[in-house]
Amino acid sequence: MTNLFIGQNRIYKVETAELNITGDSRTSLDDIDNFVRQTTRVLASYSTYVGGPQVLILQIQAINSSNQLLPGVYDYVVYYLSGTNLLRQIFPNVASARPAIIKKLASNVNSLNFTYDNVNFTLVRTVTTDITLQENSGVQNRAITISSKSTLRNY
């Protein structure tokens, strides 16, 4: 009877690890795709961040308290890794109603790669995101790699 319980517990841990990484990876890509579609420009740098394969910097139009766009006013969104955590940080303009937030989108990130359709950041129109998450369930490692391609709609 004890062996049955131990076996079922191992299966539970493995399946839980797989659900965790699958959910985090899908949620992360959905979040990135959503903001890329709102973007007016992909930037080479902002504040202390430098855009590249593991850092995505987006310029999005600011909003007022009624969620209406503010012409010529921009907020900035940065995606980056901190250890094995994928973070999204929003830097709102002082005129924007969008809150300044740092949000952890995923943990156990094994690799993250942003690919741009142009080496000149001011000409980027498409961002491809590849993310691999890996979690050790105590019994075995579970990993998932997924990709997404998003086009800037407000370029």
Image (cartoon, rainbow, N blue to C red):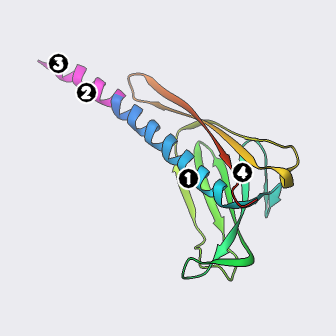
Q: Residues within 10 Å of mark 3 (few under 14, many from 20)?
A: few
- In the displayed structure, 45 sits above or below 20; it is below
Residue placed under numbered mark 4 in the picture:
56
Q: Which residues are magenta?
A: 1-14
What is the three-letter code of the residue carrying label 3?
Answer: Leu
Assess whether mark 4 and mark 1 are in contact (beta carbons under 8 angstroms).
no
Secondary structure beneath label 3: helix
Q: CA distance from mark 4 to mark 2?
A: 39 Å
- In the displayed structure, 55 sits above or below 94; it is above
Q: Residues within 10 Å of mark 1 (few under 14, many from 20)?
A: few
The image shows residue 126 at horizontal and vertical percentages of: 73, 46
- First in residue order: circle 2 vs circle 1: 2
Q: CA distance from mark 1 to mark 4?
A: 13 Å
- In the displayed structure, 8 sits above or below 23; it is above
Q: Residue at x 28, y 29 (%)?
A: 12
Between residues 32 and 109, which one lies in front from this camera angle? 32
- Please indicate whether residue 78 sits to the left or right of residue 42 in the image: left
Quadrant the C terminus occupies: bottom right
Residue placed under numbered mark 2 in the picture:
9
Secondary structure beneath label 4: strand
Q: CA distance from mark 3 to mark 2?
A: 9 Å
Q: Residues within 10 Å of mark 4 (few under 14, many from 20)?
A: many
Residue placed under numbered mark 3 in the picture:
4
- First in residue order: circle 3 vs circle 2: 3
- First in residue order: circle 1 vs circle 4: 1
